[in-house]
């Protein structure tokens, strides 16, 4: 076909293959020049898949064999004589063996497989020659074969292999080969491979291999490996991490020695947590003795807390004594939490906790302690609370007992809570189990919440009950929320309930909201209803706005157009712009200004310029120019000079816009 562009040649080959039958394709492959045989074989394979869809690989290989068979040809790879003859030849004439693969007219996949086997056979006796042959071949996947040859070289002559690789340009591929040499070397002489690894720069490509060699040596001959490591002045962090990982179970003291001598103090905390976690399980006192030699800091205090937790399981007094060793200004919260949860007997834990100064951490541990002791009698645990004076600490115990009771029997837990009438710990109990109660018995919880005194517990309970009721029955949630005494949580519950009802029963939500007496509850109900209707029933939303009182209309109109503009900006602009000049129109335009600015700042600015009230026009103009400034600051600043505003408002907007870029 002559010299031509490779892409054009491949295109012409593909067109030619598509027009031939199998017999012609087989003959063409046998007679094809070597430089196009691989491309032609690949195209023929694709053609066979097209002609015989669903045919498995074995059947396709048999078909290929018949296509390329000639009267004088030896059978393909299936006949052992071909493979055996060429592998035997490889021991005396490697290049002749590789050339012989081409002469056998094998399927390309079989040919590649046999070339790889020949190179591996050569590598058994002369890996350097195998590498040289690999570099000469264009018909062998170098990345696939190179690592195997390098590993074989590493088994036989690793120093020669590394010396051969040394002058090659540094690259990921070269590093992979170096790692393979080390792997082979480690199979025959782990100590020597380790020493060689320590001399090399640890790269991304070989860091896994180096770590693996380190761990292998430490596990196979920990004494020799440890002696070598101890003599090293400076090791790569990867080797140190591997050493610590390998030794932390078998010899944590040695791991700690390596950790201390090889890492600068600023980096120690990055790698010590795993060592400490393993050591304190086996010998917490030895670990503590080592930790005492370290500089106090974040890692020191975190590790001491882990050691105290381990001690507390068997020797609570020793753990508490360890905590008392901390400096007066040390943060003890983590240690208190871990020790309190680790002490097996809740009575022992309580005896200690009640001696500590009152704090949120201590109270939280008390609550968890009671809650986790579900295998014991909660009522017996409750007797411990009698030793405490009324207050947050006693409330924490009651809250924990409530959790323990809920884990055993929610109905009995609810009945018990209803018998309590001390407001000093009711907030803590509700905070602890209120959400579980709301899920288990939403209607019962809804009734109970009415009798709670105002406070944080009541607010949380209202929110949880509302959330459950709204999911189950929005209409019932509306009716219940309207019976609550005025509070922040009650207003939120009303708003969420009306919003949910408006989504499913729009007319009913409008009817109930508009029938409410004036006040904050009505305002919340109307606002949530209108926000929902703006995205579902805009006709009803407009009706609510228009029929509301002048005082109510303004916030409703703004929220209506704000949500509506996100669904249908042109329609929201048409409605707001068509309103009579005045406060309602201004407020409606203010609501859609931000969305209008995103779509077209110039049109949005023209619309806000028609607003009647100076204050609202200032707010809307700022929203538009803020969006414009982010896209085109120069134009936004120029347009600011054209808008109808007082000098004070114009100067204020200018300052706020310029502050964005400072």
Image (cartoon, helix red, strand yellow):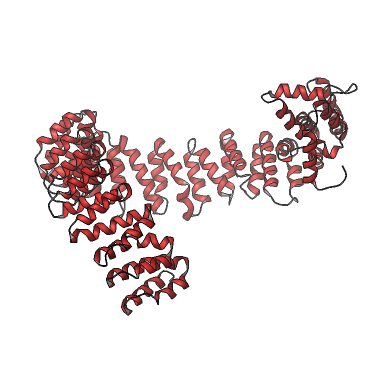
Looking at the image, the residue that sits furthest to the bottom is 647
Instruction: Tally the marks.
Output: 0
Between residue 253 and residue 106, name the one nearer to us.
Answer: 106
Q: Does residue 139 appear in this view? A: no
- Image quarter for residue 438? top left
Looking at the image, the residue that sits furthest to the right is 72
Above or below, comparing residue 579 to residue 130 in the picture: below
- Report x, y in % for residue 52: 71, 25
- Report x, y in % for residue 90: 84, 30
Using residue 186 as the reference point, say whether residue 253 is left or right of it.
left
* Residue at 16 percent of width and 33 percent of height: 414
Using residue 17 as the reference point, say whether residue 396 is left or right of it.
left
- Image quarter for residue 150? top right
Which quadrant is home to the N terminus? Answer: top right
Above or below, comparing residue 319 to residue 650 in the picture: above
Using residue 166 as the reference point, say whether residue 489 is left or right of it.
left
Between residue 292 and residue 404, name the one nearer to us.
Answer: 404
Between residue 99 and residue 487, name the one nearer to us.
Answer: 487
- Report x, y in % for residue 562: 32, 57
Which quadrant is home to the C terminus? Answer: bottom left
* Residue at 71 percent of width and 28 percent of height: 49
Q: Does residue 589 appear in this view? A: yes
* Residue at 11 percent of width and 39 percent of height: 386
- Report x, y in % for residue 121: 79, 30
Between residue 402 and residue 448, name the one nearer to us.
Answer: 448
């Amino acid at each position: 076909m002559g010299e031509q562009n490779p892409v054009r040649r491949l295109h012409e080959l593909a067109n030619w293959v598509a027009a031939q039958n199998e017999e012609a394709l087989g003959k063409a492959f046998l007679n094809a020049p070597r430089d196009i045989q691989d491309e032609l074989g690949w195209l023929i394979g694709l053609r066979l898949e097209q002609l015989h869809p669903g045919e498995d690989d074995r059947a396709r290989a048999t078909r290929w064999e018949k296509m390329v068979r000639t009267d004088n040809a030896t059978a393909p790879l299936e006949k052992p004589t071909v493979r055996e003859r060429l592998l035997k030849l490889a021991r005396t004439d490697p290049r002749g063996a590789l050339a012989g693969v081409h002469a056998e007219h094998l399927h390309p996949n079989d040919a590649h497989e046999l070339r790889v086997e020949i190179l591996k056979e050569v590598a058994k006796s002369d890996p350097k020659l195998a590498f040289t042959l690999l570099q000469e071949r264009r018909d062998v996947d170098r990345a696939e074969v190179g690592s195997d040859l390098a590993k074989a070289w590493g088994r036989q002559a690793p120093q020669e292999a590394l010396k051969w690789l040394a002058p090659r340009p540094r690259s990921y591929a070269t590093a992979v080969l170096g790692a393979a040499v080390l792997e082979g070397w480690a199979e025959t002489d782990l100590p020597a491979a380790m020493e060689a690894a320590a001399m090399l720069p640890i790269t991304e490509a070989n860091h896994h291999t180096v770590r693996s060699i380190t761990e292998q040596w430490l596990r196979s001959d920990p004494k020799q490996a440890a002696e070598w490591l101890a003599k090293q002045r400076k090791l790569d962090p990867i080797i140190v991490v591997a050493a610590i990982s390998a030794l932390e179970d078998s010899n944590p003291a040695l791991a700690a020695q390596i950790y201390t001598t090889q890492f600068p103090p600023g980096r120690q905390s990055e790698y010590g947590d795993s060592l400490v976690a393993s050591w304190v399980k086996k010998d917490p006192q030895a670990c503590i003795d080592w930790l005492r030699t370290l500089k106090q800091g974040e890692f020191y205090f975190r590790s001491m807390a882990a050691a105290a937790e381990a001690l507390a399981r068997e020797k609570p007094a020793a753990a508490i004594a360890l905590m008392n060793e901390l400096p007066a200004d040390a943060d003890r919260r983590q240690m208190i939490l871990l020790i309190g949860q680790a002490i097996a007997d809740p009575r022992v834990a309580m005896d200690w906790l009640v001696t500590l100064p009152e704090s949120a951490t201590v109270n939280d541990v008390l609550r968890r302690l009671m809650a986790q002791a579900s295998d014991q009698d909660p009522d017996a645990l409750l007797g411990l609370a009698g030793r405490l004076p009324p207050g947050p600490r006693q409330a924490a115990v009651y809250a924990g007992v409530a959790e323990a009771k809920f884990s055993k029997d929610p109905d009995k837990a609810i009945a018990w809570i209803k018998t309590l009438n001390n407001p000093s710990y009711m907030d803590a109990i509700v905070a602890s189990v209120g959400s579980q109660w709301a899920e288990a018995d939403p209607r019962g919880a809804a009734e109970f919440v009415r009798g709670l005194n105002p406070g944080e517990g009541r607010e949380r309970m209202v929110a949880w009950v509302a959330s459950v009721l709204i999911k189950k029955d929005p209409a019932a949630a509306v009716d219940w929320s309207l019976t609550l005494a005025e509070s922040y949580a009650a207003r939120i519950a009303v708003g969420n309930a009306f919003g949910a009802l408006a989504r499913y029963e729009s007319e009913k939500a409008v009817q109930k909201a508009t029938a409410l007496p004036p006040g904050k509850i009505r305002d919340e109900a109307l606002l949530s209803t209108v926000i929902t209707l703006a995205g579902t029933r805009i006709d009803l939303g407009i009706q609510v706005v228009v029929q509301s009182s002048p005082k109510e209309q303004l916030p409703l109109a703004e929220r209506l157009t704000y949500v509506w503009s996100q669904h249908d900006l042109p329609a929201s602009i048409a409605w707001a712009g068509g309103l009579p000049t005045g406060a309602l129109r201004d407020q409606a335009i203010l609501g859609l200004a931000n969305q209008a600015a995103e779509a077209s700042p110039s049109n949005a600015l023209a619309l806000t310029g028609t607003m009647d009230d100076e204050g609202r026009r200032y707010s809307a103009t700022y929203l538009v120019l803020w969006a414009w400034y982010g896209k085109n600051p120069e134009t936004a600043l120029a347009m600011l000079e054209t808008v109808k505003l007082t000098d004070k408002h114009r100067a204020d907007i200018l300052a706020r816009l310029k502050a964005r870029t400072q």
